[in-house]
């Protein structure tokens, strides 16, 4: 069992930046592909970014490519999402995920953190 706790969400103006953090419990963190998903009001949850267990490979949704950066620190059981040049359409609840599968789901989920971008 893995417990994920996100932090770092909030309200930011268009063009601003935020960094989300996710800390995981358990000793198997370093073996998991980690990721971030988001869900906007009235929409389905969508993939944002993922990172391989060793942190070598990262993948991004086209909508965030070039603006968001995912990273991880296995010594701290943590994964991060640096979000720059934020847009109103980035407004959503952002979920940390562990053991991400094929960019569409994961075995473990955090409770989510709200990100709101004002225009």
Image (cartoon, rainbow, N blue to C red):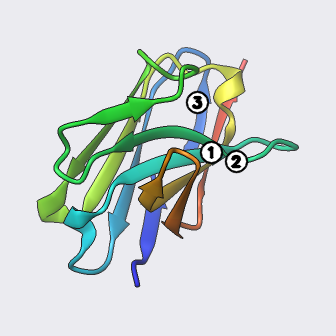
Pointer 2: what residue? 45
Distance, label 1 to label 3, CA atoms, is 17 Å
Distance, label 3 to label 2, CA atoms, is 21 Å
Pointer 1: what residue? 38
Residue drawn at (53%, 28%) of the image: 61
- Along the polypeptide, which appears first: circle 2 or circle 1? 1
Q: Is residue 118 above or below residue 85?
A: below
Q: Is residue 116 above or below residue 23?
A: above
Pointer 3: what residue? 12
The quadrant where residue 67 appears? top left
Q: Are marks 2 and 1 in contact (CB under 8 Å)?
A: yes
Question: Which element type, helix, strand or loop, lies under badge 3?
Answer: strand
Residue drawn at (34%, 70%) of the image: 24
Count of numbered circles in the view: 3
Q: Are marks 3 and 2 in contact (CB under 8 Å)?
A: no
Q: Residue 114 in the image: x percent, y percent?
A: 63, 49
Image quadrant holding the C terminus, namely top right
- Along the polypeptide, which appears first: circle 1 or circle 3? 3
Q: Residue furthest left?
A: 75
**Is 47 left or right of 51, judged from the image as shown?**
right
- Along the polypeptide, which appears first: circle 3 or circle 2? 3
Residue drawn at (44%, 68%) of the image: 5
């Amino acid at each position: 069992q893995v417990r994920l706790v996100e932090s770092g969400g909030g309200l930011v103006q268009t063009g601003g930046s935020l960094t989300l953090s996710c800390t995981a419990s358990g000793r198997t963190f370093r073996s998991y592909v980690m990721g971030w998903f988001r869900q906007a009001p009235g929409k389905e949850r969508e993939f944002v970014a993922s990172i391989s267990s060793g942190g070598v490979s990262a993948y991004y949704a086209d909508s965030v490519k070039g603006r968001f950066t995912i990273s991880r620190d296995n010594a701290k059981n943590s994964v991060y999402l640096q979000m720059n040049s934020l847009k109103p359409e980035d407004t959503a609840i952002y979920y940390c995920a562990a053991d991400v599968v094929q960019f569409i789901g994961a075995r473990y989920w955090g409770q989510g953190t709200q990100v709101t971008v004002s225009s």
